[in-house]
Amino acid sequence: MAEFGYTLMGEQAGPRQLVRDATRAEAAGFDFAVASDHYYPWLEEQGHSPYAWAVLGAVAQVTERMRLMSFVTCPTRRYHPAVVAQKAATIGLLSDGRFTLGLGAGENLNEHVVGGWPHVRVRHRMLAEALQIIQRLLTGQTVHFDGEYFEVPEARLWDRPAEGVPIAVAVSGADSCRLAANYADAMIATEPKAGLIREFENSGGVRRPRYGQVALCYGPDEQECRRRAHEQQRWFGLGWPVNSELPDPTAFSAASGMVSEDQVAAQIPCGPDAARHVDAVRAYLDAGFTHVAVIQVGGEHQDEFLDFAEKELLPALHSDV
């Protein structure tokens, strides 16, 4: 049966609100929550970007049932992979085994704060090394690693869940699908493309969870929702090859300057019509995803969305599956 998640989107809310929203999301009936891991927001209008791992630790303490996930962490630039493994093990313990470590190749937006941004082929090779280190540490091994990009003379995790921590890897094409199939327990994608699932499964990822994420902009006034979605989420349609390379919110603003409100509304359902929001989530289910996390655009509009999710969105989705 499909499961549905709520996005703790740190780019549009501060840490205290994110923790509060997580408790409300659990009460509303969401199965899991995912937390973005950024150093910058995409656009200045979003206005936030707290440290995701502190937020996850706090959320682990105020929730009881809802599973948690980083969505996603880059383990190659801001963070060394051995440190990422330690973070994940600690959140796994704090959450009583409810945590999945979501990993990806990263974006210049967040990773350039510690140095230069490598070519995409280098980033994939770095991610492959990082996954080897993290996987071994999370399964209790003492790691000695001497790679092209990372050195681990000796590392061992002293506090970790006995059952380990599941790993999910974000995919966008054939190379990342192969990485996910080789090293991860699940895949992540932000577009409802059945081809990505086929590539993942053909590479060996058969019968593993497939996580998707979809942006919604719920509210009683469709025009206001369209305005808000355009203001805060107009970068959404630029595509991953662009989004992974732009360095800061000013660059994202310039790159998305010609994106119209109509173009954004064509990708992000806006307004009070529950059927449109249900259809946006259903597109992922139809493509073969097993888990779908939703984003509500606009940090100050989470309460009204969570009320809507509890009363209309989640019951409608559960009635379909």
Image: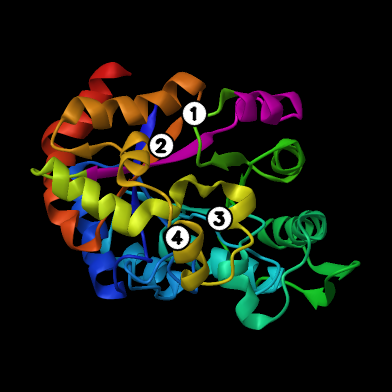
The secondary structure type at the circle numbered 2 is strand
Q: Which residue is mark 2?
A: 292
Tell me if label 1 and label 4 are in contact, CB under 8 Å: no
- The numbered dot on residue 289 is 1
Q: Position of residue 106 (x, y in %)?
A: 63, 60
What is the total number of numbered labels drawn onto the structure image? 4
Give residue 264's mark.
Answer: none
Closer to the eye: label 4 or 3:
4
Tell me if I can see residue 93 in this picture. Answer: no
Name the kind of residue labelled 3 in the image. Leu
- In space, the residues marked 2 and 3 are separated at their CA atoms by 16 Å
Q: Is residue 30 magenta?
A: no
The three-letter amino acid code for the residue at tag 1 is Phe
**Circle 3 residue:** 101
**Of 306 and 280, the residue lying toward us:** 280
Q: Amino acid at mark 4?
A: Ser
Residue farthest along the front direction in this orientation: 258
In the image, 165 versus 121, the foreground residue is 121
- What whole-number distance in Å separates the C-alpha atoms at marks 4 and 3? 12 Å
Q: Is residue 121 left or right of residue 63?
A: right
Name which residue type carries label 2: Val
Categorize mark 2 by other alpha carbons within 10 Å: few (<14), some (14-19), many (20+): many
Kindly report the distance in space between the C-alpha atoms of the residues bearing marks 2 and 1.
Answer: 7 Å
Check disc 4 and report the residue beneath it. 36
Q: Secondary structure at mark 4?
A: loop
Report which quarter residue 187 is drawn in. top right
Provide the residue span drawn in magenta: 195-217
Residue drawn 51% across the image and 22% down it: 288
Badge 2 vs badge 1, beta-carbon distance below 8 Å: yes
